[in-house]
Image (spheres, rainbow, N blue to C red):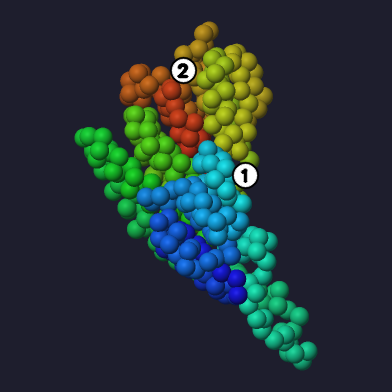
């Protein structure tokens, strides 16, 4: 029987995968952090190691480095769970010796088992006797397996849905604590608590097949990690984006959990900014979420595009020569097909609070320059995904 070690700090996720592996005939052990994972590895002698990159105390990347230092484990396959928005971390994992990276927000239990089989083969457990020819279920093992997978997924989905009210309450309390914090140390503690909750939400949503929630949580997790590691980025703009994301997750919990409504559809976004570097930064941030965009530098050119096309979201620089972002927004709001299209103004951080307290000239939101790439990604996802939600029943 082949043995698998799972290093995962989320007990729910770890237990689900351990149980799924047991059903498939593998022997699995679980460790809740990197340090205990290394200890279990030495005694358990696994054929495969699966670990989350986002572990407390010792990061998943450092765990991989330690594994590869030990002669007995230099060639043991390592599969990591990653957040696709943390590209630098994924690259570090590859360099440290990971063999395969799985996106935590997109990996179902079935996908997980398929990857395990592809990596180390079948479990090696003694197979059960084949059904007799007179057995009416003979030859239908694939169908029975599919039925079991569907039932398993349905149970996970319902358990996840039942947990959402308490999850939302905890996130909102954490957000309030962040807003009310009077010093950096307290702010960082609230950011970290939020980060750990969103990290768990990402993994649990993926298990339950809640693609939209998992996708949003994945981007949000990356934003919280960024501002926790670089506290100087905790400002009025990023705090506003964090609060908006918590609110939007609440909306997703209400209207984004229906079966059959989990696909992430394509979108079309317009970016208008006369500064080439700033414009490229916005486009890059959108590309991180695989959001397609058209970008132009002249407001007049943007007007012609707006007259002839529909867009799902528009980013406008505020200060542009010839026509300000406010003036361009007022003109596009006069076009019937763009009356309700979300518009986000991009402005300097120094002027951010004054802008947000003033009339938005028909805009929906602001983001401050210089912005974090992942902050703009999160903000874009909120508007694009909100437009795709089913109406209230």
Q: Which mark is residue 104?
A: none
Residue 297, visible in the rendered structure: yes
Q: Residue at the spot x=58%, y=45% of the render?
A: 94
Of the image marks 1 and 2, the number of the one nearer the N terminus? 1
Tag 1–tag 2 contact (CB < 8 Å): no
Instruction: Identify the residue at image location x=38%, y=37%.
Output: 229
Dot 2 falls on a residue whose secondary structure is: loop
Residue 227 position in % (x across, y down) = 38, 36
Distance from disc 1 to disc 2, alpha carbons, whole Å, reads 29 Å
Quarter of the image where one finds residue 231 = top left
Total numbered labels placed on residues in the image = 2
* Label 2 Cα crowd, 10 Å radius (few <14 / some 14-19 / many 20+): many
Residue 117: where, in percent of width, then height?
Answer: 66, 65
> Where residue 60 sits in the image (x, y, percent)?
47, 50
Residue in the picture at 61% in, 52% down: 99
Can residue 157 be seen by looking at this rendering? no
From this viewpoint, which residue is outermost toward the front?
71
Q: In the shown orientation, is residue 74 left or right of residue 358?
A: right
Circle 1 SS class = loop
Q: Residue furthest top?
A: 322
| Quadrant into which the N terminus falls | bottom right
Quadrant housing residue 95 = top right
Compared with residue 383, is residue 345 higher up or lower down, i.e. above or below? Answer: above
Q: Residue furthest left?
A: 182
Relative to 61, residue 363 above or below: above
* Residue, disc 1: 265
Does residue 186 appear to the left or right of 6 in the view shown?
left
Q: Nearer the viewer, residue 125 or 54?
A: 125
Q: Residue at x 76, y 80 (%)?
A: 139
> Where residue 302 sits: x, y (%)?
60, 19
How would you rate the neighbour count of disc 1 (Cα within 10 Å): few for under 14, some for 14-19, many for 20 or more?
few
Identify the disc placed on residue 318. Answer: 2
């Amino acid at each position: 029987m082949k043995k698998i070690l799972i290093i995962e700090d989320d007990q729910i996720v770890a237990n689900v995968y351990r149980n799924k592996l047991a059903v498939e005939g593998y022997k699995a052990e679980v460790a809740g952090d990197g340090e205990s994972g290394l200890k279990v590895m030495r005694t358990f002698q696994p054929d495969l190691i699966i670990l989350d990159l986002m572990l407390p105390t010792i990061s998943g990347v450092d765990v991989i480095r330690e594994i590869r230092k030990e002669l007995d484990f230099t060639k043991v396959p390592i599969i990591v769970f990653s957040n696709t928005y943390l590209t630098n971390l994924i690259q570090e994992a590859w360099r440290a010796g990971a063999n395969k990276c799985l996106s935590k927000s997109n990996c179902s239990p079935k996908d997980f088992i398929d990857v395990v089989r592809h990596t180390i083969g079948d479990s090696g457990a003694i197979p059960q006797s084949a059904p007799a020819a007179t057995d009416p279920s003979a030859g239908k093992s694939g169908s029975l397996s599919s039925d079991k997978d569907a039932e398993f997924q349905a149970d996970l989905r319902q358990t996840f849905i039942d947990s959402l009210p308490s999850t939302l309450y905890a996130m909102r309390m954490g957000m309030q604590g962040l807003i009310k914090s009077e010093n950096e140390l307290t702010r960082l503690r609230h950011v970290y608590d939020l980060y750990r909750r969103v990290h768990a939400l990402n993994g649990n949503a993926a298990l339950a097949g809640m693609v939209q929630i998992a996708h949003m949580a994945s981007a949000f997790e990356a934003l919280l990690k960024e501002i926790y590691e670089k506290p100087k980025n905790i400002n009025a703009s990023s705090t506003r984006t964090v609060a908006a994301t918590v609110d939007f997750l609440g909306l997703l919990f209400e209207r984004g959990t229906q079966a059959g409504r989990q696909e992430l559809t394509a979108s079309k976004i317009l970016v208008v900014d006369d500064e080439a570097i700033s414009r490229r930064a916005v486009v890059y941030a959108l590309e991180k979420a695989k959001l397609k965009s058209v970008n132009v530098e002249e407001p007049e050119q943007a007007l012609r595009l707006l007259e002839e096309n529909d867009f799902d979201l528009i980013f406008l620089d505020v200060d542009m020569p010839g026509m300000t972002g406010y003036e361009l927004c007022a003109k596009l709001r006069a076009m019937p097909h763009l009356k309700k299209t979300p518009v986000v103004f991009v402005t300097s951080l120094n002027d951010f609070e004054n802008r947000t307290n003033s009339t938005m000239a028909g805009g929906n939101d602001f983001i401050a320059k210089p912005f974090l790439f992942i902050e703009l990604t999160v903000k874009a996802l909120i508007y694009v995904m909100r437009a795709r939600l089913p109406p209230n029943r």
